[in-house]
Image (tube, helix red, strand yellow):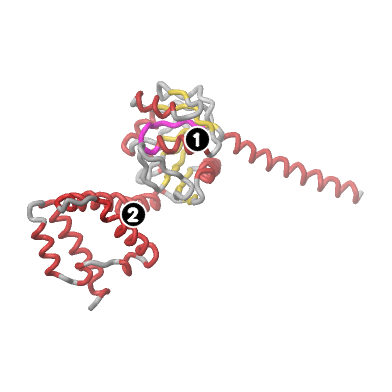
Amino acid sequence: MWFAFVRMIVFCHTKLHAIVYFYHKIISVAITSIDIIGTGNLAFNLAPALEQAGFVVNRIYGRNAQAARELAGRLYQAAIQPSLDFSDSPSNLFVLAIADDAIEEVSRELILPDKAVVAHTSGSKSLSVLGYTASPHIGVLYPLQTFSKVKKTGFKDVPILIEGDNKYTRKILTTVAGRLSRQVLTADSRQRRLIHLAAVMAANFTNALLHQANQVLQQAGSDLDMLAPLMAETLQKSFTLGPQQAQTGPAVRGDLQVLETHLEMLAGKPQLQETYRLLSQYILDEFYEEAGD
């Protein structure tokens, strides 16, 4: 009798192991095929990265037919999807790599196969923007990086923020993100919007300021390469010491004479002058007392 009881326990344990293994295999199989909606900067980087990570990209949809053909041509077997009717698609994950303002409209028009998972890639739009999608599984797959069509960007060190409306969706997106990047984080819509705001301030504003600085450099017969060592050191110090400790320059020293001279030099460029004035005043207000003399 005791022997029979032990055999029953072993049998149940084996069956449970098999069920768990089978479940994980189902999850794995479910994400081997992906369709991409969109032909912008992110789509041109994400689709090849997904293939390199071992996924099959089946179809590409884009309102710009030429861009769709170009992206599909860079992939192993992707076909061009002529409409938003994906009802016969073999894929289980549909990624909306499109402009933020288009997500809700496109998601409403999507026709999907049963049990499809739909995810947008926006940092600023909430999960609920997919609320009218014809799918019970909606989520967000947001890579925190800047992308361009003309420059390939790797994903291995890019933080990818995920959100899903249920456990199955989160599992799918976590697995996909984990095959792309070493940094996979769960963030709800509020957290992601704040992180996106910080990213815009840190990256987009900095690039815009470099554009303005380049205009000044051109007046001196120089170019942006002149600033490369300075920018590299500034960023390294900011991430090593923290921005407050790394801040330098005339404003943090309270050197008002230099600030006035710079403003006079920008008199013929009112937009640049105003940018300089606002940022210098911010540094004075935020850092000057802490720096001291």
Q: Which residue is mark 2?
A: 198
Q: Is residue 213 above or below residue 102?
A: below
Q: Is residue 40 magenta?
A: yes
Q: Residue shown at 35%/24% (left/top)? A: 66
Q: Quick check: 27 above or below 215?
A: above
- Under circle 1, the secondary element is strand
Q: Nearer the viewer, residue 215 or 223?
A: 223
User: What is the span of residues highlighted in magenta in the rendered image?
Assistant: 34-42
Where in the figure is residue 207, as x and y percent of width and height?
Answer: 27, 50
The residue at the point 21 percent across, 53 percent down is 213
Question: Is 103 situated left or right of 8 in this image?
Answer: left
The residue indicated by pointer 1 is: 117
Residue mark closest to the camera, 1 vs 2? 2
Give percent across and percent down for residue 126.
38, 44
- What residue type is disc 1 on? Val
Does 2 sit above or below residue 291?
above
Q: Dot 1: within a 10 Å radius of its alpha carbon, few (fewer than 14), some, or many (20 or more) residues?
A: many
Q: Is residue 205 left or right of residue 56?
A: left
